[in-house]
Image: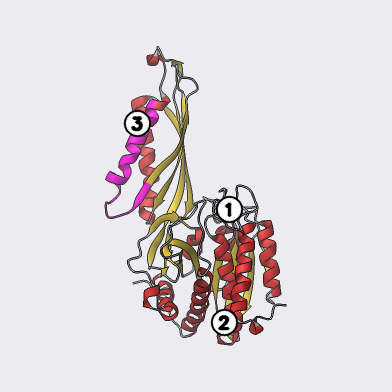
Amino acid sequence: MMDVLAMTEDELQAKCVEWRRWFHEHPEVSTKEQHTSEKIYSILEELGLDPVRGQGHYGVAATLKGGKPGPMVALRADMDALSVKEDTGLPYASQNPGVMHACGHDVHMTTLLETILRLLRRKDEIQGSVRILFQPSEELAPTGGARYMIKDGFLKDVKAVFGLHVWPNYVCGQIGVKPGAMMAGSDRIKVVIKGKTSHAGHPQEGIDAIMAAADFLEQVSHIVSRRVSPLATATINIGTIHGGSRYNVVPDEVTLEGTIRTLDETNRKNIPEFIQGILDGLKKSAGVDYEFNYYYGYPVLDNWPVPAKLVADTARQVLGEKGLASHVVPDLTAEDFGFYMQDIPGSFLWLGCGTEGQAVHGLHNAKMCPNENALVVGSKLMSQVVINALDALHKGVDFTHRD
């Protein structure tokens, strides 16, 4: 058993840096987080908690009970890495070729572990309990591991949920949070346009799928500029096109795949109908047939107003006014944390991990290297968020209230 109360602040921080570097050295992609999960399970046991394994996945959950009775809040960290070849030159770089914690989930896991250490040292102040969620497969769009944790009942009785993501564009010591949409809903599309082959010298005998695909791309590009309000935010990106078999054959099939990002659920529901209309038009005008599959993925990450304000107020309390970024602008990256907040009040925040005067290497970049001081900042903030949230709930603050 780890004697958390006997640890000095320096010892606590050193232990967490050790954990973080182990996670960084041993990254595992979505659905393959076996060793990561075993490491977390072992640490939670050392801390005197009773961890529970996920059913059919590598998620781990535990409950930290406070010194006083009360409601329950949840904290979540994601576990999976990316198929990226690391290029940081760190002495503790990935030992798994072609796999890297390029999205900072190693920092997320360790920040949550350090938060647990700090909460154990303040156990008497906790008016309730904390559900600890180590979630797998956040990068597994459009499914995402949040659904696994919800299905297993790990969110049962939780009154509020909080999470974070490292943010290289903010320097260490600064966080970003706002009420409402903060990260995008992320969906995927696959379109197969079907024509008819012929000799390139006799194009009139075929139906050119590539030409139809070109028309499709041009019309899709008009959706955002002409079918979506200029006051709203959306993007449609076609990332792959595959078609044709030979230079002198009119192609009979083209497959296009892409992603759609939106910041409100109305546009998210309308855009598939717009795409369907374009394809129906091409069927009539170009004579093609088609297959259209729309895969709904992560919802808009929509922070609840009361929990978001609580996080902002806590940031001022812990980090000072300069620790809270002003004019936080939503980002069109996506996060499956949004699934938790569909039914449970909560807030997500961006944790600065950049270093003043150093180049910024963004998320999913092979050179991404968070400042490890973010562990201290994040854990001090999140432990106080827990204390403040439970106190507010104990006093009857309505976390579900929306203006």
**Front residue of this view, candidates 306 and 137:** 137
Q: Is residue 264 above or below residue 18?
A: above
Please say whether residue 231 is one of the residues in the magenta stretch: yes
**Amino acid type for the residue under numbered disc 3:** Asp
**Front residue of this view, candidates 376 and 160:** 376
* Picture quadrant of residue 157: bottom right
Q: Position of residue 63 (x, y in %)?
A: 63, 74
Residues rendered magenta in the picture: 211-235
Which SS class for mark 2?
strand
The reply to whether the C-beta atoms of the residues labelled 3 and 1 are less than 8 Å apart is no
For the residues labelled 3 and 2, the Cα–Cα distance comes to 59 Å
Residue, disc 1:
100
Residue, disc 2:
128
Residue 160 visible, this orientation: no
Q: Quadrant of the N terminus?
A: bottom right
Residue, disc 3:
215
For the residues labelled 1 and 2, the Cα–Cα distance comes to 37 Å
Q: Position of residue 17 (x, y in %)?
A: 60, 68
Q: Position of residue 225 (x, y in %)?
A: 28, 45
Q: Position of residue 219 (x, y in %)?
A: 32, 36
**Front residue of this view, candidates 292 and 223:** 223
Other-residue count near label 3 (Cα within 10 Å), few / some / many at <14 / 14–19 / ≥20: some
Q: Which residue is the extreme one toward the top?
A: 201
Which SS class for mark 3?
helix
User: Disc 3 or disc 1, which is closer to the eye?
Assistant: 1
Residue 185 located left or right of residue 97: left
Other-residue count near label 2 (Cα within 10 Å), few / some / many at <14 / 14–19 / ≥20: many
Which SS class for mark 1?
loop
Residue 229 visible, this orientation: yes
- Residue at image coords 61%, 71%: 16
Residue 46 located left or right of residue 264: right
